Image: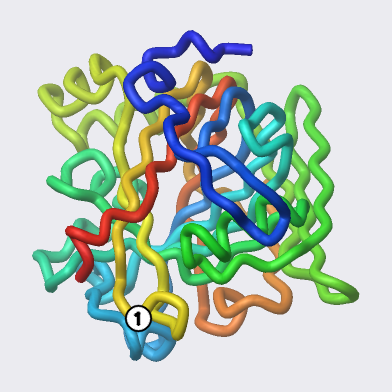
Amino acid sequence: MPKSHKLFSDFPLNKSIMLSTGEVQTPYHIYEGYGLFIAGTAPVDKVNAIMTNESLEPVINENGEALLALWLMDFTEAHIAPHTELQCSVFVQPRSISPYPAHPFAPLKFMVEAEEPAILCADIWNNTEECVAYNAEHLSLGAKLCTSAFNRTTNNVEVKFIEGDNLLLNAKINLPSRTGFGDGMALLRLFGLRKTIQVAQSPYTQLDVINRVSEQQPQNVPARSYTDVATNVVKKFDPTTDELILGNIDFGQIGFQPTMVQFVDGLNFVYLDPDLLRAI
């Protein structure tokens, strides 16, 4: 168990909170896991329609499309026990910013170049009551309970999420052993050499996760997260070999079109408590 990672000494478990499921420590620690980050676009008017109560602006590309992502994660070792997660996210900023290139990897460019990259957690599901309670009661993310199945082979990752009798998502992604030369060069051209080196040398990456406005939390409140991975494979989404079926989720209704996939393994992750001093 890689609890010796620098992340966990920089951001140790240092507080206890009481949830409906019992007492738990914070912040949120993931010690091992793997999963898929499937990013893409959707028409900005349809994205704005699901963000009417938020004090945030979606990040868009030069085609006027909003940048979105799906997180399909199997957290095999965590401080609140193993669990899985499906999260639907919109890349956001507190105010409109210049459009990003209409490029399959534009979501990654935003994540590594923005001063304070952020996502709005539009929907989230977990497969344990303890994690649903943590995400819903402590992080104000409106988490819901689901069942899930992950199947991983040498060349594929298959994932399914179900809520009750309703399919949420079914994905089958063809997985190369490493980022291909063409995709690697595309990333290098998109980021530039200096930023590529900077990212490679960073001990971990940061991303703010922001709740939706609700009766429980009437403000958009950022909570910072930090991630490091042992394995990182990036590729363009290929509809001839990759399959993504969206069921009873908003992303299935607003025209989400996947453009890229990132596979991560050997995950170390810390998700800090919401920072009310930075509420938007």
- Please identify the quarter of the rendering in which residue 165 is found: bottom right
- SS of the residue at dot 1? loop
Q: Position of residue 200 (x, y in %)?
A: 28, 18
- 129 or 69, which lies in front? 129
Badge 1 amino acid: Pro
Q: Quadrant of the C terminus?
A: bottom left
Q: Position of residue 167 (x, y in %)?
A: 80, 70
Q: Which residue is mark 1?
A: 218
- The residue lying at 30 percent from left, 28 percent from top is 185
- The residue lying at 80 percent from left, 27 percent from top is 153
Q: Position of residue 66 (x, y in %)?
A: 33, 71
- The residue lying at 25 percent from left, 20 percent from top is 202
Residue 240 seen in the figure: no
Q: Position of residue 22 (x, y in %)?
A: 70, 50
Q: Is residue 73 left or right of residue 100?
A: right
- The residue lying at 24 percent from left, 25 percent from top is 199
Indicate whether 45 appears above or below 127.
below
Q: Quadrant of the N terminus?
A: top right
Residue 42 seen in the figure: yes
